[in-house]
Amino acid sequence: MKKVSVEAYLEKIEEIYQEQPAYRTGGDGSGGTCDCIGMCRGALARAGATGVRNMRGTNTAARSGALVNLREIRDASGLQVGDVVLKVRDKDDKNMPLPDRYRKGGSGYSRKWGETNWTHIGTVTRVHPLEITHMTSPHPQKDTSLGRWSWAAELPWVEYEKKTRPDDPDGGQEDRDVENAVVWAASGGTVKLRASNKPGTAGYGLYDDIPVGTGAEVLEHGEMWCRVNIGRRKGWYMMTEYLLFDGAQVEPGEDPEDGPDAEPAADPETVEITLTMTRQEAQLLIRLADNLGWKLAQAAGGVG
């Protein structure tokens, strides 16, 4: 696989835009026709990228790994030039319904993404002011506001060496500052890592339970939510109160209260359970407890 620079990719996106091809499903800017994902595919090809795969359909690209760091967005603050942005529709939209193969029970169904229906894709060609270049009917156009663009991702064939600072009025490129943190909850259990931080959206219902003590790379540090990388989950969201940042200390009595995203763990010191069992079952339980490092206290009445 050969990657290309952001500049080369954007130059070819602009080239296709200037040619003003007519919309046709399957087109990539050659022959005077193009579709939305074909604009991305065609620009990559013109720029010299090789090994481009699974870029024939937005739902296919999103589910196959052709789009990396795929995430829901609330605003344009986390975008960089060269990112792709996506629109979604209801799975039963009358004009662009989710294909059956991506629905539950279909051959392409993904538990990770459920029945999210991505229907359109464009490229961020400027950040300040915002500009999104995309192929629509009858010809390509440029959007200057986020509107219904609600997801973002990166292309694995583009070199994203530096990130755009949201507060840079010239849209210049600066290295991204990354904080390190540790997942923390007073419960000592797990904390939810969500695909989106917007309740009621499909991404909010997609989550992993992350054990307390897991390290996190913090990409964006907000008052309520942080966008983080944890393991294979890139750009997902965790509530800020459940992250302990480098240099921070938690004093006795000052543990953050458990909220809706924290799952409690059992008290490691004492767990009282009353069981009725045969002597043979009790001996088996004691051996199992020994192997796990548990301490069992036998009630006065004995067991069995």
Image (cartoon, helix red, strand yellow):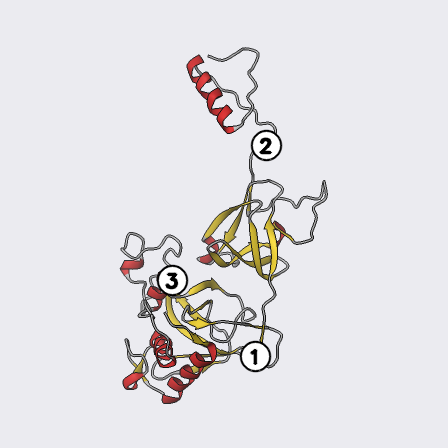
The location of residue 71, given as percent across then percent down, is 47, 62
Label 2 or label 3, whichever comes before in sequence order: 3
Label 3 or label 1, whichever comes before in sequence order: 3
Q: Image height check: is 80 above or below 274?
A: below
- Tag 3: amino acid: Gly
| Mark 2 to mark 3 CA distance (whole Å) | 40 Å
Q: Which mark is residue 128?
A: 1
Q: Secondary structure at mark 3?
A: loop
The location of residue 43, given as percent across then percent down, is 38, 79
* Side of 142 relative to 78 (left or right): left
Q: Which residue is mark 2?
A: 268
* Side of 96 relative to 77 (left or right): left
The image quarter in which residue 226 lies: bottom right
Residue at the limit of the structure toward the bottom, as seen here: 19
Give the residue drawn at x 62%, y 61%.
222
Crowding around mark 2 (Cα neighbors within 10 Å: few <14, some 14 to 19, many 20+) is few
- Tag 1: amino acid: His
Give the residue drawn at x 32%, y 77%.
35
* Side of 150 relative to 22 (left or right): right
Q: Which residue is mark 3?
A: 65
| Mark 3 to mark 1 CA distance (whole Å) | 29 Å
Q: Are marks 2 and 1 in contact (CB under 8 Å)?
A: no
Q: Image height check: is 4 above or below 110?
A: below
Front residue of this view, candidates 104 and 33:
33
Q: Are marks 3 and 1 in contact (CB under 8 Å)?
A: no
